[in-house]
Amino acid sequence: MTENYFGSALRRRIIFIIIVGMVSVQSFQLVNMQLLESGKYEEKSKDNSIKTFPISAPRGIVFDRNIEILVGNKPSFTLQITPSEYNQSNSKLIESVLNVDSGYINKLFLRYKKFAKFKPITLMKGVDYKIISWLEENHVELSGITYIVETKRDYSFGINAAHVFGYTKEIDRKTLNRNKDKYSIGDNIGFGGIEKKYEEYLRGKKGEEYFVVNSRQRIVSRYDKGKSDIQAIKGNDLVLTLDYETQKISEELMRNYKGAVVALNPTNGEILSFVSAPQYDLSDFAGVTSIAVWDSLLNDKNKPLFNRGTISMYPPGSTYKMLVAMAAIEEGIIKPSYEVNCKGGLQLGNRFFKCTHFHGKVNLKEAIEESCNTYFYKLIRKVGIDNLSKYSKKFHLGEKTQIDLSPESEGLIPSIEYYDKVLGKGKLTDGYLLNLSIGQGEIITTPVQLAQYIALIANSGVTKVPHFAKGYIESSSNEFIPFEFDSVKAEISKKSFKLIQDAMKGVVNSEKGTASGIKLKDILISGKTGTAQNPHGEDHSIFVAYAPSENPEIAVAVIIENIGYGSTFAAPVAQKIIATYLNREKRKMDLFNFNTKVPN
Amino acid sequence: MKIGAKLQDKIDLVIILSVIALLIIGIVSIYSATYNHPTAKGNLNKQVFFMMISSLILFAVYFLPARTFRLLALPSYIFSLLILVVVLFFGNTVYGAKSLMSIGSIGFQPSEFAKIGLILFLSYWLTDAKRDINNLKDLFYTVLIGIIPILLILLEPDMGTAIVFAGISLAMIFWSGLNLFGLFVVLSPGIILFASLFGTIPFMVALFLILIVLFYFKQNLFVSGSVFVVNLTAGFIFDLLLNILKPHQIKRLQSFVDPTADPLGAGYNALQAKVAMGSGGLLGKGFLEGNQTQLRFIPEQWTDFIYCVIGEEFGFLGSIIVLAIFLTLFLRLLNLTSVAGDKFGKLTIVGILTLFFIHFTLNIGMNLGITPVIGLPLPFISYGGSSLITNMFLIGVVLNIYKNRKHHV
């Protein structure tokens, strides 16, 4: 710089350039921000001042097949606390009213320390209405404590069916991470049973409310006077195939037993009643489940949480005899007139295989009616393991039924490959076979498989996958939309079916039939008893049946654990279930008559 | 026109009209910024009151005899240093800085009034006929005059005002004809300070570059050596400075680099200000309609972030008009340096121009996100009594110099 003197023209020019340059830079930035990128900032400014609050959607109602409510909704109050507005000196009072340990609120604050102070956090779910009234009365002193009304499940309609319905609970973090588009923290999600299976139909769609908030996130007003709010859409109502009365009586009959009941319509697989006993009380799961309840359920040696209808596997016992018989007839191994002289059992090598009685000469029909083991010991040696596998497969035993309830077990029908693997190649002896012929030994099936097997026999080889859901009522249109289920078939000749059906009719209706005790005057029942030995104690009592014998409308499998003969325990249960269901028309008539009976 | 020309002869209309326009814009903006605020509503009345007081002061200063300012130069500088010391002991802390003095219920900021003392005294000192700014000894004393109040202000600590003081001193020295080597001597410690802000390696590199420049100037060993030592010391002083700076100030410096890194922390204001500015668009959201302003997303918007009230509610049009008025004011002030009757008047105007310009640059820049968040009010527009009174006083000085432009004192 050469002009080193006071106020030189060059220095004046430099200052001029600095001033004009700075204003130019600022003007350029103004153009950039306010003209070119203003859209971006407008968006941000809106985000800033509009806060979205979710409106929870009530879940769909669960109905029985005649649109009777099985599971409903009721309001649930959730207390919330907003740290920035809350007065800590109220903690003692609130903690005592809520009946929680002192320091509970402080602990809550510590846990949510990283969260924004102006955001409400959940203090307690499922709060009693009385506490809400108290809060309303004292809301001035109790600033920062608010509540929201949500819905929770209402199980007060007389049906528990815990294993069918399942329950809802707060979504866990893992599931939430996988479904971020659908759920947010604190949402309820179906857990187990049809609540889980049909979650998509039941959950509904959350709505959104928009509020204008200031920089401290305090609500100033409703955005757009609430016109832009999105209303919550209630979940679709689910129509089940269950029959209210049949389900109710099934639950009552099984109240003091361990075991399972599966009753279905053999023509279409619709499950009419389903019980896994013992049950747990669903009302304990409507709101927040206490740890004490959880512990007692988890530690109960009767395992009430376990679904015996689809998971437990039992030996089918004598109910398996129909399958052995069908295999023998279909393969032309014997004629129905084939007779065996039962002398109370069969000697095989140095081992005696017992029968239940001394039956004398029996043919195939009599062998089923009287459940003669000796007949089937002899028969199985002709039929062989491969035919057993073949026909078990035809009747879908030892495989999942694909019922709309998970989890489901497969069961096991031992094949020659199985024995080669377990015993060593070629080591299978007739001893194992003899046990199999009466549904004992390595063979195990689930109650739902048994029910499907009976349905196939009852309906002469055609039914549908067992299922609980008939369809749903779309909440927007109120339209009923049915679900479709696959057909299930067992392809054997009509003649063989007829033979077995006759024999099963005889089980209940002939003089010597093992279940003649449950014979009804007005309803012709076909059935088969089973008594399954097991290492855990008394025999399992099993009874499978369908009715009416011609054009059956209900097929049922009843298993009662560790109690004794099938005819003594399971058969009467099945009988009452069948009678309740088949008398439904009569029930309606009674109702009708009652209504029209006008006193003179 | 005739009346206009006559009036123009007595008082510079460009200056006075620009200032009036800015004051009106200020009142409108403060009205909007406090409109929805529960505690700040009284600020508008206070500001109107300060405007009346400061207008009286402006006219009083305007009518003072021309020689008054020379006579006042040294006393006002000494008085400034005195109150800057007093505030360190008896002041109130505002935003982490001990910068406010209270007398009864009235609070004022000594550093605002000290600006007057610095400008007048530097003007007086630098235009003394005996002084040669290119003499190292004279330069040293000059720098010392500037440095003392800066150090006192850094102790408060008030970064923004310190920058203003440094800028004023630098501009006035520059205007006085300091040669290139002198400029280098004055500026290099600043460069070192800035470089060491980024760590040890940039500091070493800067130091090395300064060494090379020193060789280029071919000054004697003693001079070069002293300059180098001064620079080295400056680097170490920075460590001290970092300790003096309050955590919120360090955070502000850091958040300038990336304001989005901590959107609810130190960068919050800068981000919200940008959102307010940008969302204004071409014509703005309308008076009292800016949601950023009315919903109070920016704290104390009537002070340092007043410009984004204008940006949001009056849009690009409003914002650019404010820039245009300031530009007019600055260029007129620059123009008046040649109109002023003597060197003292010229240099005083340079000091005043620099004061307004630095406030303007840092304030607008902060609102637009092009400079760090350093709290400085926008002259004539932001709320604040001390700053308004000081600014109006200085405008009075300028108008006085203009009035007396034909008299050589």
Image (cartoon, coloured by chain):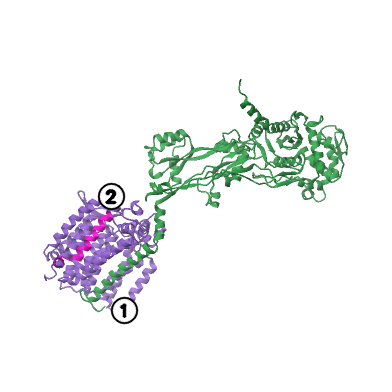
- Give residue B40's mark: 2
> Given the image, what chain letter belongs to the residue carrying mark 1?
B
Q: Residues within 10 Å of mark 2 (few under 14, many from 20)?
A: some
Residue hosting label 1: B216
Q: Which residues are magenta?
A: B3-30
SS under mark 2:
loop
Q: Is residue A579 magenta?
A: no
- Nearer-the-camera pick, A43 or A299: A43
Q: Position of residue B276 (x, y in %)?
A: 36, 57
Q: Which chain is green?
A: A
Q: Is tag 1's residue or tag 2's residue first in the polypeptide sequence? A: 2
Q: Residues within 10 Å of mark 1 (few under 14, many from 20)?
A: few
Q: Position of residue A231 (x, y in %)?
A: 48, 46
- Nearer-the-camera pick, A553 or B392: A553
Q: Are marks 1 and 2 in contact (CB under 8 Å)?
A: no
SS under mark 1:
helix
- Nearer-the-camera pick, B100 or B209: B100
Judge from the rendering whether residue A274 lies leftward or rightward of residue A217; answer left or right.
right
Q: What residue type is disc 2 on?
A: Ala
Q: Quadrant of the C terminus of chain A?
A: top right
Q: What residue type is disc 1 on?
A: Tyr
Q: Which chain is purple?
A: B
Residue at position x 69%, y 37% from top? A263
Q: Position of residue A512 (x, y in %)?
A: 82, 30
Q: Quadrant of the N terminus of chain A?
A: bottom left
Q: Where, by quadrant of the figure, is residue B258 drawn?
A: bottom left
> Given the image, what chain letter belongs to the residue carrying mark 2?
B
**Residue A547, visible in the rendered structure:** yes
